[in-house]
Image (tube, rainbow, N blue to C red):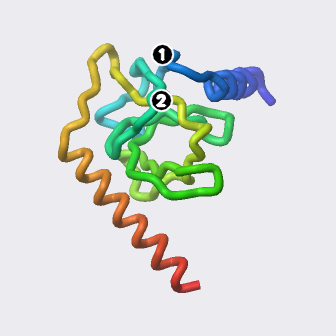
Amino acid sequence: MPQSAQQQQAVCELLSSQTGEEVFTLSVSGNCMDPLIRDGDQLLVTPCSRYFPGDLLVFADGGSRLVVHRLLGWIPGRNGMRTMTKADNRSSIDVLIEPQHLLGRVQSIAGVEVSIPLHHRGLSMLYYCYHMLRLVNASMLK
C-alpha cells in the first residue's frame, strides 16, 4: 500500500476509534457535494449523539477514506440503525453506513457555520422514501 493510502487508512481508523465530543477539521477533495462543499474547503466536524435528515455527515468508507454526504434516513440492521446517505451530485445512494463508521456532522464549511434549510431536510426525507420504496420493490420481485 502506498504511503499516502496507509496514512489515510490510519487516520480513518483513529477517527473511527475515538469516542466523546472530539471536534476535528478536514480538507475536502472532490466535487460530489458542489456547490455547497467545494474541493479544498476546510470542514469543522463534531461528533453527535443524534443526526437528522439533511445533515452533512462524515463517515469512514470501508476504512480507507473519509466521505462527506447528506443523511437521508435510517434502516434497521444487525448492529443497530444503519444510515442511508447520498452525495448531492449523485442520484444513487451510498452503501448503508454502520453506526461505528459515523464520525460526525459538519458544523462549518470554510469558516461559515452550517445551517441546513428546511427544504433540504424535506428533500432528504423524500429521497429516503423514494429509495426505500425502490429497495422494498426490488426485494418483492426476487
Q: Residues within 10 Å of mark 2 (few under 14, many from 20)?
A: many
Q: Which residue is mark 1?
A: 23
Residue 130 position within the rendered picture, expressed as x and y whole percent measured from the top left: 35, 66
Q: Amino acid at mark 2?
A: Gly
Q: Which residue is mark 2?
A: 104
Residue 140 position within the rendered picture, expressed as x and y whole percent measured from the top left: 52, 83
Residue 115 position within the rendered picture, expressed as x and y whole percent measured from the top left: 24, 29
The Cα atoms of the two marked residues, 1 and 2, are separated by: 9 Å
Q: Residue at x 38, y 51 (%)?
A: 72
Return the residue nearer the eye: 90 or 85: 85
Image height check: is 56 above or below 126? above
Q: Residue at x 67, y 34 (%)?
A: 64
Q: Which mark is on residue 44?
A: none
Image height check: is 53 above or below 50? below
* Label 2 residue SS: strand
* Label 1 residue SS: loop
Return the residue nearer the eye: 87 or 4: 87
Image height check: is 39 above or below 141? above
Quarter of the picture holding the N terminus: top right
76 on left or right of 132: right
Badge 1 vs badge 2, beta-carbon distance below 8 Å: yes
Residue 11 position within the rendered picture, expressed as x and y whole percent measured from the top left: 66, 22
Q: Residue at x 54, y 20 (%)?
A: 20
Which of the 4 image quadrants contains residue 40? top left
Q: Amino acid at mark 1?
A: Val
N-terminal label among 1 and 2:
1
Q: Residue at x 46, y 79 (%)?
A: 137
